[in-house]
Amino acid sequence: MDKWSEIRTKLVDAQEELYKVEDEYRQSKNDLDTKWNFLGDFYRGLEQKFDEKHSIILSEYSKMPDATEEMLDAAVETIRRYRMVNEEEFKTRKRDLERAYDDLESSYKKEHRKQEGVVEQLYSELRACQADEK
């Protein structure tokens, strides 16, 4: 195999590797997007459930003849604490996903630049080889 064909083969392989890096990035980003959407849906569902529970408790306490203000306050405080714990869990998961997005983006940019450098180097070698043949 002559030098031009050898460089051309390496160039094709390098371009395929570049496409592979881009495909892996897109797939990983899609996976993170799915998790992000699920987390948002889950949080909205939790908020709706807490609101429903709060309404039910207020309704039931209004029907109880022996209900006291302290009992109602304790029940509402319990809901508030559960909501706070779930919000903290949501924020933690959200930060983890944001960190995963940042890590993915950083890794992708690094790999993409590296592979682009290889492709550019091989293009330069190929042009030099073509110039030598003329």
Image (spheres, rainbow, N blue to C red):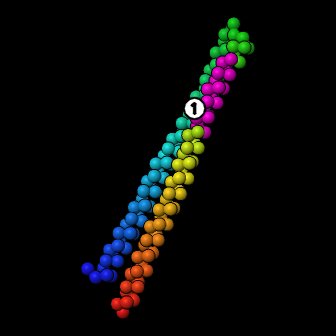
Q: Indicate the quadrant where residue 63 lies.
A: top right
Residue at 61% in and 30% down: 85
Q: Find the magenta span and give its range.
A: 74-91
Q: Quadrant of the C terminus?
A: bottom left
Q: Indicate the quadrant where residue 40 lies.
A: top right
- The amino acid sitting under disc 1 is Leu
Residue at 42% in and 56% down: 24
Residue 72 lies, with reference to residue 103, above or below; the image says above
The residue carrying mark 1 is 46
Tell me where residue 41 appears, x and y as whole percent: 54, 39
Seen as rendered, the residue at the extreme right is 69
Left or right of 129? Residue 109 is right
Residue 82 lies, with reference to residue 11, above or below; the image says above
Q: Is residue 62 in sight in this rendering?
A: no
Is 120 or 58 nearer to us in this picture? 120
Tell me where residue 3 appears, x and y as whole percent: 31, 81
